[in-house]
Image: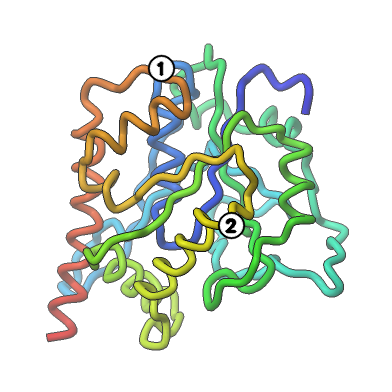
């Protein structure tokens, strides 16, 4: 990718660790496209329509066959191919082609000089089913993506906390999407996986790790470290954006508490 008129950052993430929101947050800074955020609603136990997840469609790069915006990305597993061979649909669009065909109404800043992107459907370049178990990073897939994109920085959210708000929200998400959350030890998996990422650096050395529990809880030092990584001035009202998202997580976690008394 040589001609795309922007410095590109790539967010690679484990499902459940707020990767879409993190991508959106990065993109709100002055020199980024300022993509729009869309709530993904569900019907909770009180029969209320509430956000369960968020979308930032302008930041999506579909590395396999292009999927419509309304598709359920998580129910389609393209994350591993027999004998590590890529399907014919792999890189159906190159990164530059994908960026150029994105509808203009997805962004608020047309004079951007930076961009932050996440990949679909395999958010973290995993070798195996990235919802049910964690294996090593698919280095062939990672190289294909980074060679095409040439990211300035790879941003990776990690989890190292005893706070279970994110875990409860993720278990509700799994239940709502008909996954088996009862057998999914998110707390144990996320902590162990995060330790592996930081210690072994499977994404390479050009990585900035974000403690997502700290960031979504309004930890200003964690936010300032992110700003330094993307070389941007902090947003004045950033705590309003963080609080709004934390409220979504907390409301879903409250449902988990109600139905698991």
Q: Check the image and name the residue furthest to the front.
A: 199
Residue 219: x and y in percent read 22, 40
Query: Residue 212, image x and y in percent?
Result: 34, 50
Q: Position of residue 171 (x, y in %)?
A: 34, 74
Going by the image, does 198 lie left or right of 250? right
Q: How many marks?
A: 2
Q: Secondary structure at mark 2?
A: helix
Circle 1 crowding by C-alpha within 10 Å: few under 14, some 14–19, many from 20? some
Instruction: Please say which color scheme the image uses.
Output: rainbow
Please tell me which residue is depicted at 58% across the width and 33% down the height of the picture.
153
The disc placed on residue 200 is 2
Which residue does the image show at 35% across and 72% down from the upper left? 187
Is the N terminus in the top left, top right, bottom left or bottom right quadrant? top right
Give the quarter of the image for residue 140.
bottom right
Residue 30 numbered tag: 1
Number of other residues with Cα within 10 Å of mark 2, as a class: few under 14, some 14 to 19, many 20 or more = few
* Front position among marks 1 and 2: 2
Quadrant containing the C terminus is: bottom left
């Amino acid at each position: 990718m040589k001609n795309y008129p922007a410095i590109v950052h790539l967010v690679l993430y484990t499902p459940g660790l707020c990767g879409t929101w993190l991508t959106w947050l990065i993109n709100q800074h002055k020199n980024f496209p300022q993509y729009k955020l869309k709530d993904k609603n569900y019907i909770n136990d009180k029969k209320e329509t509430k956000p369960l997840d968020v979308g930032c469609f302008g930041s999506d790069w579909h590395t396999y066959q292009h999927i419509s915006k309304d598709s359920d990305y998580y129910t389609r597993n393209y994350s591993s191919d027999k004998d590590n061979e890529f399907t014919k649909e792999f890189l159906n669009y190159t990164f530059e082609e994908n960026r150029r065909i994105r509808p203009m109404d997805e962004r608020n800043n047309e004079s951007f000089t930076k961009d932050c992107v996440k990949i679909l459907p395999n958010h973290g370049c995993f070798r195996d089913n990235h919802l049910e178990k964690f294996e090593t990073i698919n280095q062939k897939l990672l190289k294909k993506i980074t060679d095409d994109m040439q990211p300035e920085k790879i941003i990776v959210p990690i989890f190292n906390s005893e706070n279970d708000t994110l875990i409860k929200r993720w278990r509700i998400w799994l239940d709502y999407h008909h996954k088996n959350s009862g057998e999914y030890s998110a707390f144990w998996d996320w902590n162990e996986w995060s330790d592996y990422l930081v210690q072994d650096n499977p994404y390479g050395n050009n990585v900035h790790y974000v403690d997502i529990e700290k960031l979504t809880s309004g930890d200003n030092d964690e936010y300032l470290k992110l700003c330094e990584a993307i070389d941007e001035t902090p947003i004045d009202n950033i705590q309003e954006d963080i609080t709004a998202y934390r409220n979504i997580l907390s409301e879903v976690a409250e449902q988990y508490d109600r139905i698991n008394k």
